[in-house]
Amino acid sequence: MTISYRLIPQHHICRRALSTSPRTQVALPFLLRNSRSAAAPDADSGTDSSHPNGRALRMIIFGKPGAGKGTLTAWLVRKYDVLSFSTGDLLRQHIAEQTDVGRTAEKIVANGGLLPDELMLRIVSSKLDALRNKHWILDGFPRTVGQGKLFDAHLRKQGTPLNLVVNLDVPDEVILARISDRWVHLPSGRVYNLSYNRPRVDGLDDETGEPLSKRPDDNPETFARRLRQFYSSTSPLLQYYRSLQTSPSPGSEAKVVSLSGSTSDEIWPLLEHAVRSTVPALKERGVERRRTTLGEVVLARDEERRLHRPSTRDAREH
């Protein structure tokens, strides 16, 4: 059964306390978004006392370009003991480390080719297979029904099938307006929006005073092209996962949820409910675990300062 969540007015209450700065999404080269995975020595050990019943979150997330996948995933990683992966990061890591898979992929990419489904599966599975008892979220794979079938077959063989598929359903016109008004400070990745998150001085970064820029793909023409690609590839993929819910085959128990809203603040409580209902034993991170690096301490300090600014900077989108 496909579950569709829609915003209920009371979800607006106290959402601000859950918000986080876009600085939490600044990616380190070739590393996971979750800094704990790089710092903790047991991150890939396959053991995790936080869910002794063996019920680990294994989730993939879909959404249109600009729907807020990065924002919402970062909030989950910050609050819960979850690892986050993007296929782009994993691919770059393989290339940087010059693994067998990385060398093969590098040649294909250099020639302008598309990576075969089997190669993409190897790139993803090389990381996930070591995380049998860890909670993880994957973004960027699968992208086609063929990749989805290969991925599912592999996970079932490993005894670690997906249990949650999330689709972020944000109206096209909302995303278009969002990206049209978006400006970024390229060196840091800080994001501003002229509609709801203006810089203190128009055109300048709050922290450095340096000029802001438009991303090359933040325009209606590029958005329309990427949106067509999303609908052509992701809609059949979502239908595939929905069809598995009525399939008698083992390992096809993944719950498919569609979360509707116009902002990440609206979608956040719905996403959190979907995750917690899938894995009730999912533990929150303690404050001392959330701020284990100097970078995280700085991010937390900046967030506290931002929360005490005037209400005109009340929401952030990416």
Image (cartoon, rainbow, N blue to C red):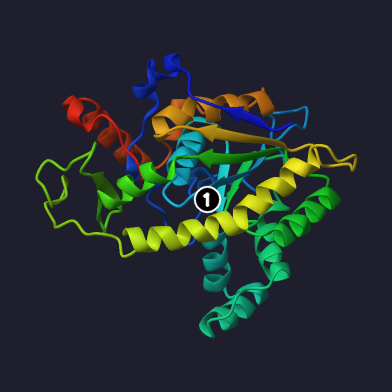
Residue type at mark 1? Ala
Is the residue 224 above or below the residue 278 in the image?
A: below
Q: Residue at x 73, y 45 (%)?
A: 241
Is the residue 205 above or below the residue 75 in the image?
A: below
Where on the picture, by quarter, is residue 201?
top left
Is the residue 170 above or below the residue 149 in the image?
A: above
The answer, for residue 151, to whether it is visible in the render is yes
Counting from the top left corner in percent of width and height, residue 113 is at: 58, 80
Where on the picture, by quarter, is residue 308?
top left
In front of the other: 20 or 234: 234
Q: Residue at x 59, y 81 (%)?
A: 108
Q: Quarter holding the C terminus?
A: top left
Q: Is residue 103 left or right of residue 303?
A: right
Q: Is residue 109 left or right of residue 288?
A: right
Is the residue 39 above or below the residue 316 in the image?
A: below
Q: Residue at x 25, y 27 (%)?
A: 307
Label 1 crowd (10 A; few <14 / some 14-19 / many >=20):
few
Q: Quarter holding the N terminus?
A: top right
The answer, for residue 132, to whether it is visible in the render is no
**Pointer 1 residue:** 38
Q: Residue at x 58, y 83 (%)?
A: 107
Counting from the top left corner in percent of width and height, residue 173 is at: 38, 44
Where on the picture, by quarter, is residue 164?
top right
Counting from the top left corner in percent of width and height, residue 114 is at: 60, 75
**Residue at far bottom of view:** 111
Counting from the top left corner in percent of width and height, residue 44 is at: 66, 48
